[in-house]
């Protein structure tokens, strides 16, 4: 007794997806181990984090998983095509009709899951790429502040949080965080505003509090670090950068609002009461250096 056309299709689908699933799981475990335990740099004491390092690591991780999904699709296609040609031998039994349709149902669910995971990974890839580009651009603008005697650090870890950029100077310590938001066509002329009372960002088409809430937590944690380091209260200034949007001037509130075009005016917002003592700067710079070390750059 030989396969009917339908039975050949069911067997081909089951075997091809089995091969692809083994390939996918093996590759996923290997990639997880590679990204979870990256190689350590032999020069940890002199390696600093470049701008956008965290976003770049996420970008590389998503890119490798997209390559894995593409390879899985290729294995699935090659296995299915090969099995359709060679799967002609006799079998000693004919599966029950409900077994065939159960296999079809399971195979369809696996294909749906494969497509869903691929779309999620593709979406995360574009989001991490946009974040990386935005942090590179913001880091380039802030790098110009080094000409005025300021120190700029990137991806500074404080408690369980990450500050995108820290600017240390005689006037103040600035915590600069980048909020990457896609700009819909309906909001091409929208101007982002800071709502200090509501502690929200108004994008014209919607309001959100996530960026302001996260910036507030970072200021609080960094303030605790500086107070413990210096022995007196020193509250850093917070700035939120929204690349690709027009921003309204900040009038009040705990956070400054910028885009890439006006970020260079950051230092002009420091007030006399925000000034640091001369003897504070070496200790702060040393602390920021220790918090911005890059031990696993890849």
Image (cartoon, helix red, strand yellow):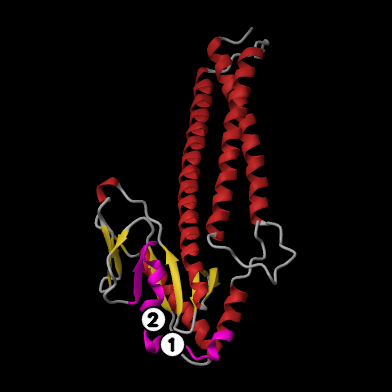
Q: Residues within 10 Å of mark 1 (few under 14, many from 20)?
A: some
Over which residues does the magenta segment extend? 254-283
Q: In front: 162, or 72?
A: 162
What residue is rendered at 70% in x and 72% in y? 45
What residue is rendered at 43% in x and 73% in y? 217
Name above or below for residue 136 compared with residue 270: above
Q: Earlier in the sequence, mark 2 or mark 1?
A: 2
Question: In the displayed structure, does residue 94 sit left or right of residue 260?
Answer: right
Residue 188: give x, y in percent of width and height. 27, 50
- Real-space CA distance between mark 2 and mark 1, rounded to the nearest whole angstrom: 8 Å
Residue 253: give x, y in percent of width and height. 30, 76
Quadrant for residue 275, please give it: bottom left
Name above or below for residue 20 compared with residue 248: above
Residue to which mark 1 is pinned: 275
Whether the residues at callouts 2 and 1 have beta carbons within 8 Å, the answer is yes
- Tell me the quadrant of the picture where the C terminus can be found: bottom right
Question: In the displayed structure, does residue 279 sit left or right of residue 130?
Answer: right
Q: Is residue 110 magenta?
A: no
Residue to which mark 2 is pinned: 270
Q: Is residue 272 magenta?
A: yes
Q: In front: 148, or 235?
A: 148
């Amino acid at each position: 007794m030989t396969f009917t056309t339908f039975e050949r299709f069911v067997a081909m689908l089951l075997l091809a997806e089995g091969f692809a699933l083994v390939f996918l799981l093996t590759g996923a475990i290997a990639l997880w181990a590679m990204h979870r335990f990256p190689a350590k740099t032999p020069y940890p004491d002199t390696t600093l984090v470049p701008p956008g390092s965290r976003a770049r690591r996420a970008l590389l991780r998503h890119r490798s998983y997209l390559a894995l999904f593409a390879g899985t699709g290729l294995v699935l296609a090659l296995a299915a095509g090969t099995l359709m040609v060679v799967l002609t031998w006799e079998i000693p039994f004919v599966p029950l009709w409900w077994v065939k349709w159960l296999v079809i149902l399971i195979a369809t669910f696996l294909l749906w899951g494969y497509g869903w995971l691929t779309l999620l990974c593709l979406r995360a890839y574009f989001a991490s790429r946009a974040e990386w580009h935005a942090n590179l651009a913001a880091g380039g603008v802030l790098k110009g502040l080094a000409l005025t005697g300021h120190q700029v650090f990137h991806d500074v870890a404080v408690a369980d949080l990450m500050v995108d950029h820290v600017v240390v100077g005689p006037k103040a310590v600035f915590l600069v965080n980048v909020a990457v938001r896609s700009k819909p066509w309906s909001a091409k002329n929208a101007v982002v505003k800071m709502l200090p009372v509501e502690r929200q960002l108004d994008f014209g088409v919607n309001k959100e509090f996530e960026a302001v809430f996260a910036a507030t937590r970072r200021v609080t944690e960094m303030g605790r670090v500086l107070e413990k380091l210096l022995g007196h209260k020193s509250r850093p200034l917070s700035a939120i950068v929204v690349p690709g949007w027009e921003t309204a001037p900040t009038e009040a509130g705990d956070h400054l609002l910028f885009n890439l075009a006006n970020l260079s005016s950051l230092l002009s917002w420091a007030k006399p009461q925000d000034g640091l003592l001369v003897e504070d700067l070496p200790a702060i710079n040393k602390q920021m250096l220790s918090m911005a070390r890059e031990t696993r750059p890849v």
